[in-house]
Image (cartoon, rainbow, N blue to C red):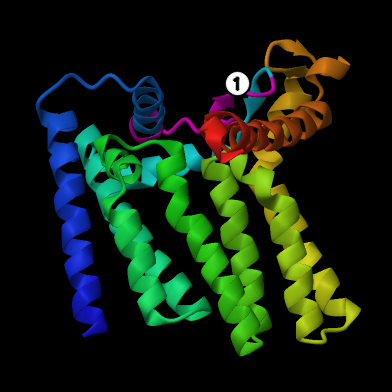
């Protein structure tokens, strides 16, 4: 019964998303600048074999450069079919994967009823339904970050160290798709420490997890670092300039991201609520 209910919710989510998808891709011009840019870069990789060393630029901390793995990921999809609408189909498929992962995560941590409730609320949410209108970095990132969480929970429950390492690698991959994932890195690292302590692992396991994190980060972000130091520039500024240095930009991006989200919560609780509540 539980799986039949889940299947019905998945069909509902797919139907609602497909209606938005059809309206965006077939009934109106395609006007999402970021998606157009990403498609053209990925298509260039396929047709000319030229691979960029940097990924998309993010405007939060001036212009913070990302990893090119995101472009390589899109190029691998376009190698199947070179069509921007095909990327939309992939985005729709990943949205269904997100629904399944939400159910698995909630059902694993709580129970099946909670999993069905969570996935139903997510499937009918207007904000998530609108994610079907085009492919975009935050939308493509969601299934990978959720998979990272699920692997971490499984690692805790099954006391499986390999699942924890896999969770770390998937987490780093999600940062290459959307850089703002770094904003939750402190919480994620705290969860890893908690899991390892609960499993009574020795310090060697802690160092192994840290080495996996550092190694995957280095492999993922070595191309933009190579570009930065080769050209002695960071997004139009001097590499030696404090305001445009790599470490300053990265730290500023994480701190700025944290305060932006904190401000949203504060506005919700202290500004938007009616005065009579107080």
Magenta stretch, main secondary structure class: loop
Tell me residue 145's x, y (percent). 52, 56
Mark 1 secondary-structure assignment: loop
Q: Any magenta on residue 252?
A: no
Q: Position of residue 202 (x, y in %)?
A: 87, 83
User: For this rendering, which residue is in front, 32 or 271?
Assistant: 271
Q: Quadrant of residue 9?
A: bottom left
Count every numbered label the image shows and give the total.
1
In this rendering, is residue 195 above or below 71? below
Pointer 1 local density, CA inside 10 Å: few below 14, some 14–19, many at least 20? few
The stretch in magenta equals 44-61
Above or below residue 251? Residue 62 is above
Can you see residue 147? yes
Residue 223 horizontal side relative to residue 8, left or right: right
| Location of residue 82 in the rendering, given as x and y in whole percent from the top left corner | 24, 37
Give 181 or 55, whichever is nearer the viewer.
Answer: 181
247 vs 160, left or right, is: right
Write the residue at 75% across / 53% down.
186
- In the picture shown, does residue 33 fall above or below 4? above
């Amino acid at each position: 019964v539980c799986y039949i209910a889940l299947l019905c919710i998945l069909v509902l989510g797919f139907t609602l998303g497909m209606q938005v998808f059809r309206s965006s891709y077939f009934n109106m011009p395609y006007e999402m600048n970021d998606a157009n840019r990403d498609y053209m870069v990925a298509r260039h990789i396929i047709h000319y074999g030229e691979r960029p060393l940097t990924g998309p630029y993010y405007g939060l901390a001036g212009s913070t450069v990302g990893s090119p793995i995101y472009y390589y990921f899109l190029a691998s999809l376009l190698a199947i079919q070179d069509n921007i609408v095909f990327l939309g189909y992939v985005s729709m498929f990943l949205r269904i994967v997100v629904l399944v992962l939400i159910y698995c995560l909630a059902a694993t941590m709580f129970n099946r009823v909670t999993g069905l409730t969570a996935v139903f609320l997510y499937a009918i949410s207007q904000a998530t339904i609108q994610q079907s209108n085009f492919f975009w970095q935050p939308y493509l990132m969601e299934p990978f970050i959720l998979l990272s969480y699920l692997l971490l929970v499984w690692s805790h429950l099954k006391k499986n160290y390999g699942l924890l390492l896999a969770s770390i690698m998937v987490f780093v991959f999600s940062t290459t798709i959307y850089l703002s994932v770094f904003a939750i890195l402190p919480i994620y690292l705290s969860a890893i420490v908690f899991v390892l302590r609960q499993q009574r692992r020795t310090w060697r396991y802690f160092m192994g997890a840290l080495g996996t994190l550092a190694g995957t980060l280095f492999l993922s972000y070595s191309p933009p670092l190579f570009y930065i130091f080769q050209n002695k520039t960071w997004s139009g500024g001097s590499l030696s300039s404090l305001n445009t240095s790599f470490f300053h930009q990265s730290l500023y991006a994480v701190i700025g991201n944290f305060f932006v989200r904190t401000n949203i919560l504060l506005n919700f609780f202290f500004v938007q609520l009616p005065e009579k509540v107080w």
